[in-house]
Every structure is written in structure tokens, then in C-alpha cells.
Image (cartoon, rainbow, N blue to C red):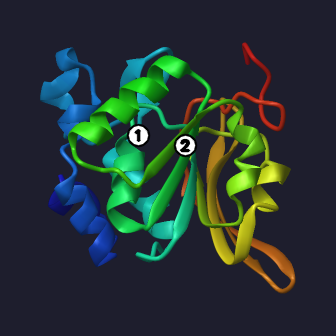
Amino acid sequence: MVRTQVAARGLRHARVLAALAAVPRHCFVPAALRDAAYDDAPLPVGYGQTISQPYMVALMTAALAPRRSDRVLEIGTGSGYQTAILAHLVKRVYTVERLPELSRGAAGRLAALGLDNVEYRIGDGSLGWSDAAPFDGIVVTAAAPAIPGPLAVQLAHGGRIAVPVGDLAFQELLVGVLGPGGLAVHAEGGCRFVPLIGRHAFPEGF
């Protein structure tokens, strides 16, 4: 998977590739789908949510330029796969999930893998985690209509944020870096994610 789906597409971040190789993706998908765990595609994980395509996980992670000393906020814990990748790369991961069943399941999987540098919260991810801010990186694993304002202000100086932005018809992965002049944003290309539900995102039932 790492060689043919990620490295072959030009992603060369050595630490990200190593983390992808270290995390057993089949542990993060339903038992009935484990034969497809390493396919080049997203997969359903229940409750209308998905585990992202391996390449997209790698691209979003690399966009944060993760360092071992970083503190990173993840919005949308899901099955915990992206969380586990981040936990291999940074000092501390703070992850927010609005669905309690997914949050609890992810926490159990990461604990079983010995990953103990993660803090979990159940709630509205569009609000971020203000009492743990600022963060060196923020990754959002669901699409918002715009970069949620509360997340942008929770970045540390020089921090990076990766957010899918758009609607159900068209989305782009936006990457922002907070500098002296504010948040400088560029697009990394098209993507497809489930919608981010919250006060600063889409309404329930969107």
C-alpha cells in the first residue's frame, strides 16, 4: 500500500511513509471489510462515516509537516486511523469526534496498539479544543463550507491546518500556514469527504 499507492504518487515524506507502514490499517475497518483494508479507496466504518483513502491520509498528514515535538488537533476521530498515524509522528494528539460510539471505539484500538499520547473529546469539532490550544497542526477529516473560524485562531504561530472545503458536489483540500500576515492558504487539489457537522460547519442532516 505505502509503496504503490502513496510513494508511487510522489509523496516522499519519510516519516509519514514510515508511520503508514507501522499502523495496521485492517484494525481500523469493520471485520467484514478487512480484505479491502489496504485498497486504494475510502471505506465505511459505520454511523455514516468513512476511513479515508490511504493516499489522502498521507497527503493531509504530510501537509502538516509534522515534527516529533508538535501538538496536533484532529477534528473527526472516526475509526482512529488518522489519529494513529499522527500519534506515531508527534508528541501529543488531541482528537474530537461528535459520535460517542466512534470515539470510544477509536480509543480502544489505539490503546491496544500501545499508543498512549492521545487525548479524546466528544463534541462539536468545528469549535476545536480551545483549552488545549494553540496547536502546531490541525487536520480536519470531514468537509466544511469554509475553514472554521475557531480552528484558525487555535493555531500556533507557524502552525499548519489541512481542511477539505466545499459542499457535497465539489471539495478541495485547503492547506493554511499561520504567518505574520495571517493565514496563507493554498489548494492541494480535489477530494471527497463526508460533511463536518457543527456550529461553524454544516447543520445536522445536511
Task: Tell me if I can see residue 91 in this picture.
Answer: yes
Mark sitting earlier along the chain (1/2): 1
Query: In the rendered image of this protein, does residue 81 appear above or below residue 160?
Result: above
Q: Choose top left, top right, bottom left or bottom right for residue 107.
A: top left
Q: Residue at x 25, y 57 (%)?
A: 20
Task: Answer whether labels 1 and 2 touch (C-beta < 8 Å).
Answer: yes
Horizontally, residue 102 falls left or right of residue 20, namely right
Q: Would you place residue 86 above or below residue 176 in this image?
A: above
Kind of element beneath mark 1: loop
Horizontal side of residue 170 vs 41, given as left or right: right
Q: Quadrant of the C terminus?
A: top right
Horizontal and vertical percent position of residue 118: 44, 50
Viewer-closest of 92 and 141: 92
- Give the answer, above or below, for where 151 lies relative to 171: below
Percent x, y of residue 95: 54, 44
- The three-letter code of the residue at mark 2 reads Thr
Q: Amino acid at mark 1?
A: Ser
Neighbour tally class for label 1: few under 14, some 14-19, many 20 plus, Cα within 10 Å: many
Q: Is residue 54 left or right of residue 125?
A: left
Mark 2 sits on what residue?
141
Residue found at x 49% / y 14%: 47
Q: Which residue shows up at 71% across the image and 32% down it?
A: 124
Residue where numbered disc 1 is placed: 52
Mark 1 to mark 2 CA distance (whole Å): 8 Å
**Image quadrant where residue 171 sits:** top right
Q: Nearer the viewer, residue 111 or 196?
A: 111
